[in-house]
Amino acid sequence: MNLKYLTLAALLAAGAASAEHYKVITPLSKDDDGAMARLVNFDSGATVDSVLVADGVATFEGEVDEPYLARVVVDGGRLPVFILESGTISFNDKEGAFGTMLNDQLRQLGREISQLGSQFQGADEAAQKTLYARYEALVDSTMQSNRDNPLGYYLFLQSDMAQAPASEIRAELAKYPDFAKYKRVQGMLAAAEKREATQPGRKYADFEVTYDGKTERLSDYIKPGKYTLVDFWASWCGPCMRQAAVLKDLYAKYHDKGLDIVGVAVWDEPANTLAAIKSHGLVWPNIINAQTVPTDLYGIMGIPCILLIGPDGTILSRDKQGDELVADVEKYIK
C-alpha cells in the first residue's frame, strides 16, 4: 500500500478511536410518554439528539469526541445542566447527574458546598467569614484543576462574571484562556462591551423594531427638551411588574414637568405583552416584540433594565430601580 494511504488510514483510525460512547438515562414522568425529548449542547444551543419519552424515561446514546455541557429539554421544560462525557449518565432529583468522572466530581462539589451552607446558617459573623473563605477556596481550586474541561467552565458560568465589566472578564480569561473558546463566554464579553458603550455619559443607541406591519424606532420617542425613561421589560418578569408601579408614580408626578416614558417589550410574546399593558394600566407608549434587538445592543443580561435619557440624548442613569431610580429622576427633573 502507498505510504500516503497508510498515513490517511492511520489518521482515520485515530479519529475514530477518539470518539467515546455515552448513554444518558433521564427519568421523567409517565405523563411525558410520547413527548419529544431533546439533548441540547448547552453552550451552542444546538440539538444533539431527540427521542420520544417511553415508560417515563428518555434515553440517549451516541458518541462524544470530548466532554461538553448539555441539558435535556422536554416540551419546553429544561432539566439541570450536566456534563456529556463517555459512560452511562443517570440522574436523581436532588443532586443531578452521576455515573461518570466529571459529573461525579460536580456532584461531590455540590455536597461540599451544601455542607458549608448548612454550617453557615446560624454561625456568628466571624465563623461565617471563615466558612465563606473556605467556599471561595473550594470553588477556585476546583476551577483551577478543571480549567481545561467543562467542569471548570461550568463554575466560571456560575460566578458573577455575567454582570462584570469587560475589563474584569478579560482579566479572568487571562487566567483561564481555555474558557474563551465557549460561545457563552464570547457572548458575555460582547455584552459587557456593549454595556460599557451605553453607560451614563454616553449617547443612547437607537434601534428599530417591526411588529404588525409597523416599524418603530427608539428615537421616535426621545424628544428634544424632554427627559425619557426607557423601560426594557417583559410580562412574565415579576420585578418588571413591581417597577411598573414605580414608573406609574413617576409618570403621574413628573409627566407634566417634562418626563416621558417608553416601554420596550423584550423576550416576550406580543399577546402577553399587550395583556400586561392593559391589566397594569401602562398609559405610556410601548414598543412591542423587540425580543433581543435592544438587549443585544445594550448588553442587557437581565430585566428590568431602565435608562434615563436626557434632552440631548445622553444617558443619565442606567440599571437603577426603586428609590435609586426615583432619586435620579428627581435630581434631573428638579
Image (spheres, rainbow, N blue to C red):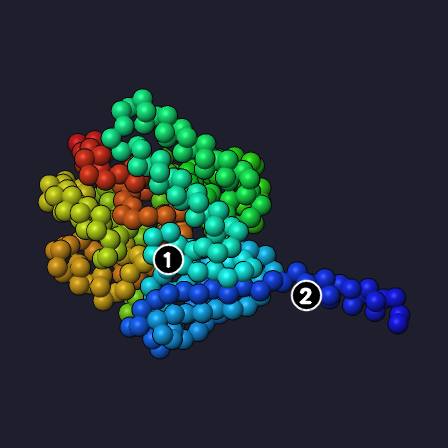
Q: Is residue 215 above or below residue 102?
A: below
> Residue flagged by tag 2: what amino acid is it?
Ala
Residue 92 is labelled as: 1
For label 2, the residue is 16
Q: Is residue 175 left or right of residue 277?
A: right
The picture places residue 133, in percent across and down from the top left corner, at 40, 28
- Is residue 251 among what the camera can see? no
In terms of depth relative to the viewer, which is nearer, 98 or 169? Answer: 98
Look at 40% across and 59% down and name the residue there.
91
> Residue flagged by tag 1: what amino acid is it?
Asn
Q: Is residue 162 above or below residue 272?
A: above
The picture places residue 275, in percent across and down from the top left corner, at 17, 63
The picture places residue 178, in percent across and down from the top left corner, at 58, 45
Q: In this view, does 313 lie to the left or right of 107?
A: left
Q: What element carries label 1?
A: strand
Look at 19% across and 46% down and name the residue there.
243
Quadrant containing the C terminus in the rendered view: top left
Distance of mark 1 from mark 2, alpha carbons? 32 Å
Look at 35% across and 71% down and name the residue there.
56
The picture places residue 52, in percent across and down from the top left corner, at 40, 75
Quadrant containing the N terminus in the rendered view: bottom right
